[in-house]
Image (cartoon, rainbow, N blue to C red):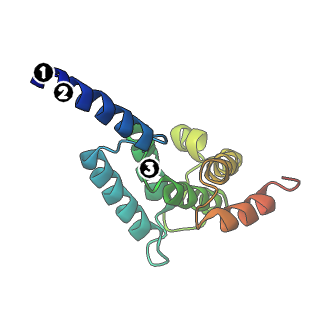
């Protein structure tokens, strides 16, 4: 057997073994986008805390991150924050008040729309991230805002 043939045989078996090991491929995560999304999540948590209660800022950070990098490794956490922020804003809680006289704000932050958004965020969390530590609270909150679910 020639050296070239031996290399071919090794390469053939090697790729078979690699293919067998990679039956369930992991999600490729972009380290730069992952770091940026993590920064947005950290900023969102700071805005969410009781001293700030900047729920509009949380939603803005979530929307920005979801649009740019929906496969973020901690998207379940972000969905939870966005859902809770939507609920609080729908009750006009927090330090950033909603001005329903402003057409742009009314369109984005109308109480019914915020509740609908929260239902979507929590439902997505429950469906796509069944092992999430936020699942139980999402299910509980979803039942409170959408009876019969």
Residue farthest to the right, as pictured:
148
- Vertical position of residue 97 compared to residue 118: above or below: below
Q: Who is closer to the viewer here, 68 or 15?
A: 15
Which quarter of the figure has residue 74? bottom left
Q: Residue drawn at (60%, 62%), measured in percent from left and top?
A: 84
Q: Secondary structure at mark 1?
A: loop
Image disc number at residue 60: 3
Q: Nearer the viewer, mark 1 or mark 3?
A: 1
Q: Secondary structure at mark 2?
A: helix
- Vertical position of residue 65 compared to residue 144: above or below: above
For the residues labelled 1 and 3, say whether their Cβ atoms are less than 8 Å apart: no
Of the 4 image quadrants, the one containing the N terminus is top left
Within 10 Å of disc 3 (Cα), the crowding (few <14, some 14-19, many 20+) is some
Image disc number at residue 2: 1
Q: Nearer the viewer, mark 3 or mark 2?
A: 2
Query: Which residue is the site of mark 2?
Result: 6
Within 10 Å of disc 1 (Cα), the crowding (few <14, some 14-19, many 20+) is few
Within 10 Å of disc 2 (Cα), the crowding (few <14, some 14-19, many 20+) is few
Residue farthest to the front, as pictured:
1
């Amino acid at each position: 057997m020639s050296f070239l043939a031996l290399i071919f045989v090794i390469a053939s078996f090697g790729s078979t073994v690699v293919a067998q090991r990679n039956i369930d491929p992991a999600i490729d995560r972009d380290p730069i986008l992952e770091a940026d999304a993590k920064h947005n999540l950290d900023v969102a948590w700071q805005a969410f805390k009781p001293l700030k209660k900047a729920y509009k800022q949380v939603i803005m950070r979530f929307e920005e991150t979801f649009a740019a990098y929906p496969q973020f490794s901690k998207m379940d956490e972000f969905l939870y924050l966005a859902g809770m922020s939507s609920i609080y804003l729908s009750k006009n809680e927090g330090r950033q008040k909603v001005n329903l006289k402003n057409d742009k704000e009314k369109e984005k932050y109308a109480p019914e729309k915020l509740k609908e958004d929260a239902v979507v965020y929590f439902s997505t969390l429950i469906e796509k991230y069944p092992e999430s530590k936020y699942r139980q609270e999402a299910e509980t909150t979803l039942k409170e805002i959408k009876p019969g679910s």
